[in-house]
Amino acid sequence: MRLGIFGAGYVGLVTSVCFAELGHTVVAADKDREVVARLADGVPTLYEPGLENVLRANLRAGRLTFTTSTTEALQRGEIVFLCVGTPGRADGRADLSQIDEVVRSIAPMLNGYTLLVEKSTVPVDTASCIIRALRRLTGARNGYEVASNPEFLREGSAIEDFMHPDRIVIGADSPRAQALLLDLYRRDFACPILLTDIKNAELIKHAANAFLATKISFINMVADLCERVGADISIVAQGIGLDHRIGPHFLQAGLGFGGSCFPKDLKALVRIAEDLGVDFGLLREVERINEARAARLIKTLNEALWVLRHKTVGVLGVAFKSNTDDIRNAPSLHVIPQLREQGVLLRIYDPQAAFKIATQFPAEAGLQYVPSAYEAAKGAHALLILTDWDEFRSLDWRQLRSLMRTPVIIDGRNLFDPAAMHARGFEYYSFGRKHTQEPPDADMPERAEPAHGFHTAASRIDPLPTVAGGEDD
Ligand code: UDX
């Protein structure tokens, strides 16, 4: 099929390259000349595993074009996807000015049948507003339709998520629009395709993100309980997640959620509900819990180091999650300035996102960007782990420990087994699990820990599989 894509940001770019990879002819339009020039040259504008290869292969194959002309994308597409940004406004509501701009720019050029599909996250009922605007601008009731086909991809695994989704949601109010979108997807995707009306589809996206965020804040509160009573959140989460009604995912406790979607979508849904006369206070609480996580980490650091002023702290990871260079709403944005205010000297390392964070917090005498985790550890009184990068799981702990002034680790992502870190000679603090403060005592006989695992018919304990990540050595 011939597809037009408006917006070559995260969603638009991934959607463009993936549809091209599936054999469709894609014209992607973005008003940013520099972005278009870079992408047309095969240079990705953001870090995403696998993106560069797919981008280059499809440019070479001639299936993918980038342009600054919305007319070109509109006229060459049988279906046109709206993938422009819908950032949050100061009051929490979604800023739909980029959608409005696209609608106004294409209205004079609509000619024949065009299906405009919302792919960016938009408040429920946005399609009705687009239709009303088009009616006013064109004077016509026909010749165009609007549908909703929300994208659920995650940064860091966006290509994989696009190609292998759990489900595809098509919201369309006419058989013609439904058939067009079904034709687009049916051939290549084996997952369930939910056909519904536009309002349901719009709401599904916001509700899905809000629910996932709720799971994270919920488990983080249970983690706080675990910490108070000496229980272990990874095992409690596993026990909860084995109930198929709950499921094992999104129960990873720690620093909480960041990124371009969850924080913004939560705020937007609270506002949408409010505007509709529904008090969705639950989501305000989810937000409040999440916003307190960074402060908790700093409090733990404070307790571990006693006085923070003039201490050196290595920071491992600043991206909001692994496999991305995105720092939007990342906990590091709170942790870094708060520690600097308290006079802490920071040595920061991130495999991809250091460049972006340096634009917010430029290097200075008390804040250095270093090229490896080992450099971050040099002379440090403590190491903070803020992002779950895989490379942190297989560090040489002996070397790292020898570089540090005091072997203290505050792990905001619960990447390691506290007992193993203790055995490696670290004071190890994480979320919702026992802190191991005293260095191991060589003279003390080993105390048998109770077993945690699945009891099998053979009466042995099979170790629990790790929920997310785990030990590499
Ligand atoms: C999310 C949704 O998952 C995706 O469907 C939607 O399209 C966009 O928003 P994304 O923000 O890229 O995707 O990342 P995701 O993997 O969902 O993680 C979001 C945040 O939650 C990250 O900061 C992550 O570290 C955190 N998280 C995730 C937890 O703290 N615990 C978990 O168990 C899972």
Image: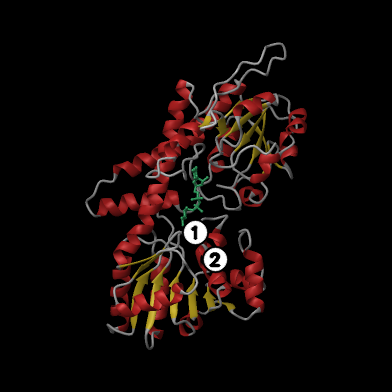
Q: Nearer the viewer, residue 3 or 93?
A: 3
- The type of residue carrying mark 2 is Val
Q: What secondary structure is marked by label 2?
A: helix
Residue 164 in picture, x, y percent from top left: 51, 62
**Upstream in sequence: badge 1 or badge 2:** 2
Q: What secondary structure is marked by label 1?
A: loop
**Residue behind mark 1:** 153
Q: Nearer the viewer, residue 222 or 6?
A: 222
The image shows residue 110, relative to residue 284, as above or below, that is: below
Residue 236 in picture, x, y percent from top left: 46, 32
Callout 1–callout 2 Cβ contact below 8 Å? yes
**Residue behind mark 2:** 14
The image shows residue 139, relative to residue 230, as above or below, that is: below
- The type of residue carrying mark 1 is Leu
**Could you tell me if residue 288 is visible in this image?**
yes
Decide if residue 451 is on the left or right side of residue 87.
right
Residue at 56%, 22% in the rendered image? 303
The quadrant of the rendering that contains the C terminus is top right
